[in-house]
Image: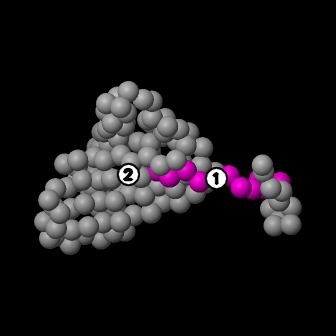
Amino acid sequence: MKMIIELPNHKCISWNSIYSTKHWSVRATLAQEIHELVHLYICQQYAMKGKLPPKFKRCEITITAYFKGKRRHDISNICEKIYEDGLVMAGIIEDDNLNIVVGIHKFAYNDQKEDKVVIEIEERPIKYEWKSYGPKDFKEVK
């Protein structure tokens, strides 16, 4: 199963904008706005289809940022955490720990027609259940 969420006309949030000497309350407000934006676009995309959005038990997330103009951006400054937390708030993933989100990937492209962010969530199967910390102690889950 795969889910794609597009946030049109949205400039990707960077770590620099979050930690550029802003007070914690300003950062908290920004985070809340992004969480609500993700939730809103999920609701809109699925309401138009007349369906409920899927829920993922184990997944990988890909964040793709599209930047208008030719200004240089550092891919390491893309703040994927704020979008991941929005998925938790929207109920798409239960939590953002390693048991649920097994990987996060980031891509970015300059010189695009508009600023936007695309979030892809792809389900990953649960293959093994670990009983202890040794590799010989695993059993396959069916």
Residue 94 relative to residue 35: left or right: right
Secondary structure at badge 2 equals: strand
The reply to whether residue 23 is in sight is no
Q: Residue at x 38, y 27 (%)?
A: 50
Region in magenta: 121-131
Tags 2 and 1 in contact by the CB under 8 Å rule? no
Circle 2: residue type: Ile
Residue 70 relative to residue 126: left or right: left
Secondary structure at badge 1 equals: loop
Q: Find residue 119 and name its label.
A: 2
Circle 1: residue type: Pro
Sort mark 2 into few (<14), some (14-19) or many (20+) by Cα contacts within 10 Å.
many
Q: Nearer the viewer, mark 2 or mark 1?
A: 1
Task: Indicate the position of residue 28 as horizontal and vertical percent values.
Answer: 35, 42
Decide whether residue 123 is among the magenta residues. yes
Task: Indicate the position of residue 52 as horizontal and vertical percent values.
Answer: 45, 30
Residue bearing the label numbered 1: 125
Residue 51 lies in quadrant? top left
Q: Find residue 100 and name its label.
A: none
In this rendered view, identify the residue nearer to me: 6 or 97.
6
In this rendered view, identify the residue nearer to me: 54 or 115.
54
Decide whether residue 94 is among the magenta residues. no
> Is residue 106 depicted above or below 92 in this figure?
below
Q: Alpha carbon of mark 2 to alpha carbon of mark 1: how far?
A: 20 Å
The reply to whether residue 109 is in sight is yes
Q: Residue at x 44, y 46 (%)?
A: 3
Task: Indicate the position of residue 66 as horizontal and vertical percent values.
Answer: 25, 60
